[in-house]
């Protein structure tokens, strides 16, 4: 039987065969491009949805935060008071307040310098237990670092005073440079204001150096406060055994009508001051003194 001859491959048939696969590749390329566009579009839509949800959540949570901020700030605003005109003279005595009848009560102002420090919390505890309000002259750097302690001092009814930002003390002979002291005072005032919402009315110069300070202090609207009794607790050894010595020195003010007592809750280990404080309160109370804060001067 004769073999059937195979059809001869012509250039045209070869050309048609090559066209078929080429057209198939072009279709897949288009499909791939379409799929890529779909993926991109889906990504954009999902991102838009996520952003919208996130914005709604932020808006929802921002409203309670705003109302909370108002609730916190309102008490500070209501307790803020205007400072009286600054005293022309340096103050060494506690405010005189009416006693029984028309008599003027004997008053004593306990003051604490160089805080807030590690002993401030213990001092506040003892004052609260004794029902005593005092005046705290704070260092600005420490006030800015411990705003919660300043808020506790204010919440317990104590007065806050400015004791400069850094407690750098010039010599008695040289005195203060006006520009430097003005900056130290304002930075500390701002730290107290930021923490409590209250601007102080009182200033105590570190080391009791008053030369060059009077004009700056009055310009800042502050009365300058010193003391009448210094038990030198700042030089006491860090031991409770020294507490009776401090208590005895503070008792020198019992001879005065309106003593201002200089004590310290910062600037070093004040364990002796803390140990003496309850006895100091008892001594003055038993002699009929009324405890006052120095912001009662006005």
Image: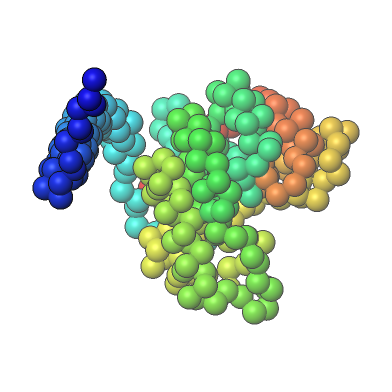
Q: Position of residue 136 (x, y in %)?
A: 55, 43
What's the colour scheme?
Answer: rainbow
Q: In this view, does 207 lie to the left or right of 159?
A: right
Q: Residue at x 29, y 38 (%)?
A: 77
Q: Quadrant of residue 51?
A: top left
Position of residue 202 measured from the top left corner of the image (x, y, whole percent): 47, 53
Horizontal side, residue 109 vs residue 37: left or right: right
Q: In this view, does 130 lie above or below 5?
A: above
Q: 2 or 279: nearer the eye?
A: 2
Q: Which of 244 and 204 is in front in this view?
A: 204
Q: Where does the N terminus fall, quadrant-wise?
A: top left
Where is residue 173? Give x, y as percent: 67, 78
Judge from the rendering whether residue 213 lies leftward or rightward of residue 123; answer left or right. left
- Residue most toward the bottom? 174
Residue at screen point 43% across, 34% down: 98
Please state which of residues 281 and 43 is positioned toward the viewer in this rendering. 43
Q: In the image, what residue occupies the spot 36% across and 42% down?
A: 197
Residue under the image location 63 percent in, 36 percent down: 120
Question: Image quarter for residue 242?
Answer: top right
* Residue 221 visible in the shown view: yes
Can you say whether 173 is above or below 67 in the image? below
Q: Determine if residue 55 is in view.
A: no
């Amino acid at each position: 039987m004769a073999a059937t001859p195979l059809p001869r491959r012509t250039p045209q048939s070869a050309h048609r065969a090559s066209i078929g696969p080429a057209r198939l590749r072009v279709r897949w390329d288009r499909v791939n491009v379409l799929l890529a566009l779909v993926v991109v579009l889906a990504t954009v839509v999902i991102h838009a949805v996520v952003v919208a949800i996130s914005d709604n959540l932020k808006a929802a949570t921002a409203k309670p935060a705003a109302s909370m901020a108002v609730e916190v700030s309102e008490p500070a605003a209501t307790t803020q008071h205007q400072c009286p005109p600054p005293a022309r003279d340096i103050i060494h005595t506690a405010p005189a307040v009416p006693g029984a009848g028309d008599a003027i009560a004997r008053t004593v102002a306990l003051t604490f310098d160089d805080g807030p420090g590690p002993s401030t919390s213990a001092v506040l505890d003892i004052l609260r237990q004794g029902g005593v309000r005092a005046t705290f002259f704070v260092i600005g750097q420490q006030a800015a670092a411990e705003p919660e302690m300043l808020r506790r001092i204010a919440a317990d009814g104590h007065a806050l005073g400015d004791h400069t930002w850094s407690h750098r003390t010039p010599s008695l002979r040289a005195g203060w440079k006006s520009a430097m002291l003005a900056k130290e005072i304002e930075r500390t005032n701002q730290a107290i204001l930021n923490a409590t919402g209250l601007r102080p009315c009182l200033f105590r110069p570190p080391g009791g150096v008053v030369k060059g300070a009077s004009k700056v202090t009055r310009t800042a609207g502050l009365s300058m406060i010193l003391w009448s009794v210094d038990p030198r607790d700042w030089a006491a050894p860090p031991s409770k055994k020294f507490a009776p010595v401090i208590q005895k020195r503070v008792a020198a003010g019992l001879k005065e009508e309106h003593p201002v007592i200089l004590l310290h809750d910062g600037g070093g280990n004040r364990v002796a001051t803390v140990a003496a404080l309850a006895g100091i309160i008892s001594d003055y109370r038993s002699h009929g003194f009324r405890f006052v804060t120095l912001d009662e001067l006005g």
